[in-house]
Amino acid sequence: MYQVYEVRVGDTLESILDRTNLSEKELRELNGFYQITPGFQLVIPKMKYYDTYIVQKGDTLYNIAQKYGIPVDLLAKMNGKEEEDYLYIEEVINVPKENTEYYVTKKGESLSDVLSNTDWTLEDFFEQNKTLLLEPDQIFIYQKRNL
């Protein structure tokens, strides 16, 4: 799960690393050569709630998931993969940070369902999910304010 970050006027390497919660090494691993000039686009992890893992010879999603104590389908989703996908040696994948929990929605669940199945408050949910992805054809209901 990655996003593109476009370098802004006034950005420095330090400000980008602070904003993205990455180390310079991680930024280089994800982007190879990069420039800190306005308009340059960098690939960064979508959420700061992941660490990265470098795939070693013999690794599979299954044994990495076991190592981190999470379901293999969750690890696959974190990395935009299918459970049976092949991993390449030295491929960088997302793994859960220590003391971080994840919830994967099921078909037809609403935000109310998610909140009732977790111990989150609505404020916690939005604070920790600022880059929430929306699916096509979702319906949001709002009432126009009278001006």
Image: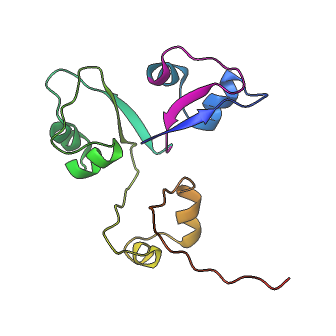
Quadrant location of the C terminus? bottom right
Answer above or below: position of 82 versus 140: above
Residue 34: x and y in percent read: 57, 17
Q: Give the range drawn in magenta.
A: 30-47
Q: Nearer the viewer, residue 45 or 116?
A: 45
Mark yes or no: residue 71 visible: no
Q: Nearer the viewer, residue 107 or 103?
A: 107
Does residue 9 appear left or right of residue 40 in this picture? right
Residue 145: x and y in percent read: 77, 83
**How was the colour assigned to the protein in this rendering?**
rainbow
Q: Is residue 43 magenta?
A: yes
At horizontal 67% and vertical 25% (from top left) the residue drawn is 14
At horizontal 53% and vertical 57% (from top left) the residue drawn is 129
At horizontal 31% and vertical 48% (from top left) the residue drawn is 77
- As drawn, the residue found furthest toward the front would be 137
Q: Is residue 142 magenta?
A: no
- As drawn, the residue found furthest toward the right would be 147
Residue 43: x and y in percent read: 51, 31
Q: Which of 38 and 60 is in front in this view?
A: 38
Answer above or below: position of 38 versus 70: above
At horizontal 27% and vertical 42% (from top left) the residue drawn is 81
Quadrant location of the N terminus? top left
In terms of secondary structure, what is the magenta stretch mainly? loop
Residue 9's image quarter?
top right
Residue 11's image quarter?
top right
Residue 41: x and y in percent read: 59, 28
Q: Which of 33 and 28 is in front in this view?
A: 33
Does residue 12 appear left or right of residue 31 in this picture? right
Mark yes or no: residue 102 visible: yes
